[in-house]
Image (cartoon, helix red, strand yellow):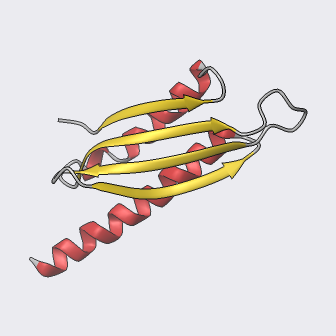
Amino acid sequence: MGVGMQIIYLGFAGTAPLEAEAGAQLVRLARFGELVSNCHLAIEALRAGSASPLYDVRLDLITAAHELRPVARCAGANAEAAIRRAFDMAEKALETTAASARVLS
């Protein structure tokens, strides 16, 4: 079974390009299915409608043991780039966890 994802948009209506970017990034975490069962992605528009919008992206992982593991909080004018950075950090954290598990076994 794959890793599931819940996306929450705060301060603006979600868009198809953001949804597509999040889905593409989620594929990167599929190889960690034994460690992660779900993730929560929150995308908040802090200055929606202004000339220079700012987006705050938060990514939390839900482990196979149903524990919440906050991973990343990224902000920037480009929401898609912030999503990619959040998933970059999640992937690195999961790689570290997987490597530690291999050493212990």
Corner quadrant of residue 48: top right
Q: Is residue 76 left or right of residue 43?
A: right
Quadrant in which the C terminus appears: bottom left
Measured along the vertical axis of the image, is residue 95 above or below residue 78? below
Measured along the vertical axis of the image, is residue 47 above or below residue 64? above
Measured along the vertical axis of the image, is residue 75 above or below residue 23? below
Q: Residue furthest left?
A: 105
Q: Is residue 102 left or right of residue 39?
A: left
Give percent across and percent down for residue 43.
58, 37
Q: Is residue 103 left or right of residue 84?
A: left
**What residue is rendered at 18% in x and 80% in y?**
103
Corner quadrant of residue 102: bottom left
Quadrant in which the N terminus appears: top left
Give percent across and percent down for residue 55.
69, 41
Give percent across and percent down for residue 94.
34, 62
**What residue is rendered at 59% in x and 22% in y?**
14
Give percent across and percent down for residue 59.
47, 48
Q: Looking at the picture, tell me which residue is in the foreground, 32 or 86.
A: 86
Q: Residue furthest right?
A: 51
Q: Is residue 87 left or right of residue 4?
A: right
**What residue is rendered at 51% in x and 39% in y?**
42
Q: Looking at the picture, tell me which residue is in the foreground, 20 or 60.
A: 60
The tally of labels here is 0
